[in-house]
Image (spheres, grey):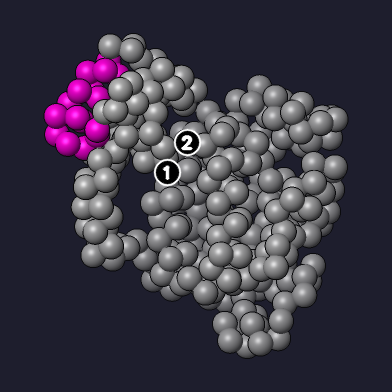
Amino acid sequence: MLLSKKESLEDSIVRLLLEREQSVKTLMKTLSQVGFSVTIQAIYKILRALVANEVVIKRANIYALSEEWRERIIDTFEKTQNRFELAEGESITFDLASLVHLDQQWKNIVLPLHNAHPTAPVFFYNPHEIWIHLNESRKKSEYEYYESFKENKTHAFALFGGDTEHDRAMKKELQNDYLQIAVGVEAFSKTDYPTIFGDYIITTRISKRLSEEIEYAYKESTTSTVLEERLQKIGIEKKKVKLIIERDREKAKKLRKKLSKEFFVPPLLIKEFSLY
């Protein structure tokens, strides 16, 4: 459960209940949004089994994860070290069927790497901050990710290549004392969304055609509501993407130096983490 190569309906239900307690009606609506064609009877069948196994508890018509089960799982994972690590000079590429799979791989591989180096400054580039506009679940996780820099007092530097009103609005909304954001400098291809921390470079790569459709949506949308409607109409969540993870100390330094031109990076930070 929750660790299978392909997420099952049961896995998805548990993952959704990890986010918050829900009714069967709400679960069915969310599952249909992420591509599951499922009957309400199938959901009830799985929930009955989860309740019987004391994974889920039921209060009236609301289902929630058992806190005892949640704590047991957390305790197990805290005792297990992250198993994903590349040697210097190694790289690995994942061909993913959709952004749903991308989100799963990111959380499974990249977030543990972040946790292994919690104070290391993070540099990243987005042609546009599209992730926040995809769906409510992804929007929530994106906001939490950006807010985590302030909460953990970790310095981060984000460059958005676009310079539309939507990019500028994101900068105004997201930047804080620990997160610097700059807009309007195309430092990489419009197909690439790299993140650099420590010796690692993690790049999400979309197709050229998809990048062109995103550009059009940003330039032609007059409001954020229209922008989200256009992005969702493109069907970004169902497009194939690549996740490329590299461990290359010198390349990471070069990319940080390239991005740092748009920011004030404290000298002490540069020295402490040998940023470039």
**Which quadrant holds the N terminus?**
top left
Q: Quadrant of residue 6?
A: top left
**Magenta segment, which residues?**
42-57
Residue that badge 1 annotates: 104
Q: Residue at x 19, y 30 (%)?
A: 51
Judged by its main secondary structure, the magenta piece is: helix
Pinpoint residue 173: horizontal percent, then vertical percent: 74, 50
In the picture, measured across the screen, residue 30 lies left or right of residue 12, that is: right
- Residue 45 drawn in magenta: yes
In the picture, measured across the screen, residue 92 lies left or right of residue 198, that is: left
Q: Which mark is residue 100?
A: 2
Q: Secondary structure at mark 2?
A: helix
Residue 252 visible somewhere in the drawing = no
In the picture as drawn, the residue positioned furthest to the front comes out as 60
Q: Residue at x 17, y 36 (%)?
A: 54
* Marks 2 and 1, how far apart at CA: 6 Å
Q: Residue at x 72, y 35 (%)?
A: 214
- Callout 2, which amino acid? Val
Q: Do the residues bearing badges 2 and 1 touch, measured as CB atoms within 8 Å?
A: yes
Q: Quadrant of residue 48?
A: top left
Pinpoint residue 82: horizontal percent, then vertical percent: 32, 63
Pinpoint residue 224: horizontal percent, then vertical percent: 76, 33
- Callout 1, which amino acid? Gln
Q: Quadrant of residue 90?
A: bottom left
- Residue 133 drawn in magenta: no
Q: Nearer the viewer, residue 243 or 275?
A: 275
**Which quadrant holds the C terminus?**
bottom right
